[in-house]
């Protein structure tokens, strides 16, 4: 049976003792990451090679003897940062990502723990348990913590793999990773849509629908800018500076939640209403490196929309096709297929076809052409 990994995020409501332990565990996780990153850097400078993650994990028991306060937290939370460091190095060498950086108290306030299963006297035990009826989660060292979220769900159908506990400002969250069976639905194509991802409008569909980017309308960016100016005027180490830092974190958290809601609201509607979805295979990384359009992409989550559409189509057994990025979707007339090569200027938003005389909206015409190209790809796959 095919399985998928699904994440469920809950709001945590720990008591004061649990908050203290969460903060301590986050600090220990950060300490382990920074300690082994520094060790790798120093060893590479001396010998030209560095230890693997498995060699470094063997050093943790000795490190706990030198720093006894590491024994007070969950043991899994001390091993996972080493694997995170290994992944950071892997991305640096294979994907040209930046070199791994040291963690600080303001960024990455989270830790990960694994679900350890055991059997004793014919009874099965798990270190992570979620009780959706009583709205509690049991975590290593923390024991039972009240949660909120997924009111319409009664039980997880699958195995819990791990959990990430995160602190954002004064709020705490837990993300539970569950391995669930993928129920394959029969594919019966009844509708198709072409998507043109834009800057002025977030998505333009071949059904003549334009979806606005509500992130542009939000006043949160102005508030963040004002708070950052106030932060720059505050004296370092003062109480007012810490208060403004907390306000900035809350503003960024609100912006993040608006972005997340917008992405899932749009993608849910597209996947629900259509069986075949076609979009351009955009080189988003290159777009951010183009000065003329990079400044407009700050509040446009194109990469995230693309990623979310991919896994939702997989879950719902819908087809997602990507048209070649060099296909001139904006230049081709969707009525007579005449290509107008004078339309490379992005400021031209509407144009009249010299051959058939049809007046096109640039973005809607592009989405219709993308839809037809996707239909060709689908028909070729049936041959």
Image: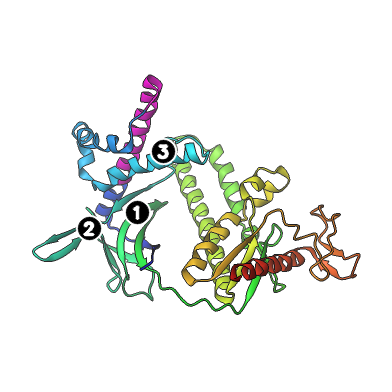
**Label 2 crowd (10 A; few <14 / some 14-19 / many >=20):** some
Using residue 69 as the reference point, say whether residue 183 is left or right of it.
Answer: right
Quickly name the residue at label 2. 127
Please say if the residues under marks 3 and 2 sit with CB atoms less than 8 Å apart: no
Residue 323, percent across and down?
A: 66, 60
> Of 314 and 201, which appears nearest the observer?
314
Residue 179, percent across and down?
A: 34, 63
Q: Residue furthest left?
A: 121
Name the residue at 49% across, 46% down: 244
Name the residue at 38% across, 66% down: 2
Question: N-terminal of the two: label 3 or label 2?
Answer: 3
Find the distance from the CA under tag 3 to the CA under tag 2. Answer: 29 Å
Which range of residues does the magenta coloring cover?
A: 24-49
Using residue 189 as the reference point, say whether residue 160 is left or right of it.
Answer: left
Name the residue at 64% across, 62% down: 279
Question: N-terminal of the two: label 1 or label 2?
Answer: 2
Residue 11, percent across and down?
A: 37, 62
> Of 114 and 356, which appears nearest the observer?
356
Name the residue at 31% across, 47% down: 23
Q: Is residue 24 visible?
A: no
Q: Nearer the viewer, mark 1 or mark 2?
A: 2
Instruction: Check residue 104 in the rendering and tell me which mark sits there, or answer none.
Output: 3
**Label 1 crowd (10 A; few <14 / some 14-19 / many >=20):** many
Quickly name the residue at label 1. 165
The residue tagged with tag 1: helix, strand or loop?
strand
């Amino acid at each position: 049976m095919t399985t998928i990994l699904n994440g469920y995020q809950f709001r945590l409501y720990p008591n004061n003792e649990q908050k203290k332990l969460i903060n301590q565990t986050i600090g220990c996780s950060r300490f382990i990451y920074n300690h082994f990153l520094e060790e790798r850097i120093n060893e590479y400078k001396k010998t030209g090679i560095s230890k693997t993650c498995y060699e470094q994990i063997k050093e943790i028991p000795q490190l706990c003897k030198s720093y006894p306060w590491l024994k007070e937290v969950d043991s899994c939370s001390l091993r996972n940062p080493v694997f995170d460091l290994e992944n950071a190095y892997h991305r640096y060498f294979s994907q040209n990502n930046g070199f791994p950086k040291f963690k600080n108290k303001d960024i990455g306030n989270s830790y990960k723990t694994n679900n350890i299963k055991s059997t004793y006297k014919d009874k099965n035990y798990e270190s992570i348990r979620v009780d959706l009826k009583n709205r509690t989660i049991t975590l290593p060292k923390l024991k039972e913590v009240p949660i909120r979220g997924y009111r319409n769900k009664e039980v997880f159908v699958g195995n819990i793999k791990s959990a990430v506990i995160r602190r954002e400002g004064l709020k705490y969250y837990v993300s539970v990773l569950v391995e669930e069976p993928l129920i394959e639905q029969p594919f019966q194509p009844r509708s198709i849509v072409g998507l043109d991802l834009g800057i002025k409008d977030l998505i333009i569909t071949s059904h003549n629908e334009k979806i606005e980017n509500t992130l542009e309308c939000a006043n949160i960016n102005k508030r963040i800018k004002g708070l950052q100016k106030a932060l720059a005027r505050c004296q370092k180490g003062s109480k007012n500076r810490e208060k403004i830092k907390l306000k900035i974190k809350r503003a960024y958290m609100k912006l993040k939640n608006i972005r997340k809601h917008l992405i899932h609201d749009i993608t849910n509607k597209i996947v629900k209403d259509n069986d075949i979805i076609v979009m351009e295979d955009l080189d988003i990384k290159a777009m951010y490196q183009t000065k003329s359009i990079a400044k407009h992409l700050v509040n446009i989550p194109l990469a995230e929309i693309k990623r979310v559409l991919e896994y939702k189509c997989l879950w719902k057994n819908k087809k997602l096709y990507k048209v070649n990025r060099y296909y001139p979707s904006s230049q081709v007339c969707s009525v007579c297929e005449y290509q107008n090569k004078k339309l490379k200027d992005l400021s031209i938003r509407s144009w009249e076809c010299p051959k058939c005389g049809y007046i096109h909206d640039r973005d809607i015409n592009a989405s219709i052409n993308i839809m037809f190209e996707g239909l060709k790809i689908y028909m070729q796959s049936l041959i």
